Amino acid sequence: MQDSFAFIIHPLNPKRDVSRKYPALGKLPAWLIEFLSIFYPPVFISEIEGVRSVENGRSLQGWFVACPLTPNMMLRLPTPLVYRKIVQTGKLAEKLGAKILGLGAFTSVVGDGGISIAKQLSIPVTTGDSYTVAQAAHAVREAAVLLDKPLAQSTVAIVGATGAIGSVCAQLLAPDCGKMILIGRRVEKLAEVATAVRHQGGQEVIVSANMDDLAQAHFIITVTSAVDTIIEPQHLRHGAVVCDVSRPRDVSKQVAEQRPDILVIEGGMVEIPGPVNFNFDFGFPPKMAYACMAETMALALDKTYVSFTLGKDIKLSQVQTIDTIAQRHGFKLGGFRSFEQAVSSNKIAFVKAAQLSDQNAGAAVPYINPNNHISVDPVII
């Protein structure tokens, strides 16, 4: 039997994402789409073709299957009901013949991070968070090279540093950066993460619950489970780079509209090896996928049919292992995208100039919102 996988997706924006598969349903009001999603069964989306290892030429059969619930519904509904919907979707994957299942977006966040889901399925399950961490770190390092701004001379901030992904991102980048700011709301957990970061070689590590401290950072990785955006234009210094790993996004659209000096990149975009065809438009260019999707594919290509990443704890060794597996089979950073648009060389040059101007000013130059918008610190993990 051919090696195979399935990946669960779900609508982040009810009207937009439902329209991708069902144009008529997408015309309904968002509240009605969300209400109907409670009763709607799991959906077969598409067959994924052409994933092929560069190491041995092995190919995969794969499928996208959809859980109909939106992030808001997953947070509002009782957790057992949400589990039941996700498990139903996993059962559909099993019927299709999948040997491993990846949990996408909020299906990997809700409850205990996939542990309860895996117990109710007969195939292994992974959240993809380990490879998401690896790719976020690769993206920040690549941005630093393109902008000629060495991480060793920079301040790196991790928003959501107490979460599973954020804490390991911090440890992974610890040896590279001059200063690190860990931002979260659980003070005791922040202290634990800070200790782990120092153990990995972090020299100057600061913990904070204040989003205004982002104004110090040249590079930011943001990875929270917030439903609404939490990073606004006034939070960022001139020439900052923000790698937004979260879905839904942590970075407000206003950053793109009001701050041309800021580079926001979508964390975890990966180029898939082989002549891949997803047979479904989820907003990425051809051959590109989220890192969580890529982890599931890489494990299947490697015949590593185990529940690789589950729960709220990710070990640094897991991240390093999946990164090695993925590189061996030909997965790699797929370039930069920002708010669903490719990042141009002109954009890179503009941000590079902004960073240089900021550096020449001698200190972080705070951004003043012309509308005197006063923000309230959001809830972050």
Image (tube, grey):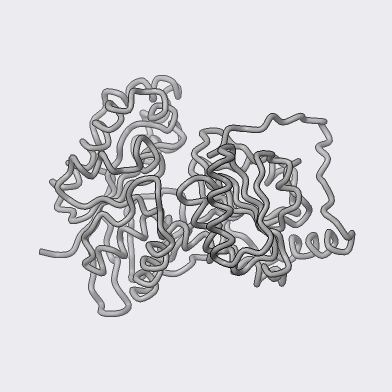
Where is residue 367? Give x, y as percent: 81, 44
Is 178 above or below relative to 188?
below
For the N terminus, the image quarter is: bottom left
Dividing the picture into quadrants, the one containing residue 50 is: bottom left
Number of callouts: 0
Question: Would you say 7 lies left or right of 283 here?
Answer: left
In-front residue for pair 175/20: 175
Question: Would you say 123 lies left or right of 237 here?
Answer: left
Where is residue 207? Give x, y as percent: 65, 47
Q: Residue at x 45, y 49 (%)?
A: 164
In-front residue for pair 106/34: 106
Where is residue 206? Give x, y as percent: 68, 51
For this orientation, the residue located farthest to the bottom is 55
Question: Would you say 232 lies left or right of 18 here?
Answer: right
Dividing the picture into quadrants, the one containing residue 85 is: top left
In-front residue for pair 254/356: 356
Where is residue 91? Give x, y as percent: 17, 41
Q: Residue at x 44, y 28 (%)?
A: 72
Q: Residue at x 21, y 67 (%)?
A: 303
Is 49 above or below relative to 114?
below
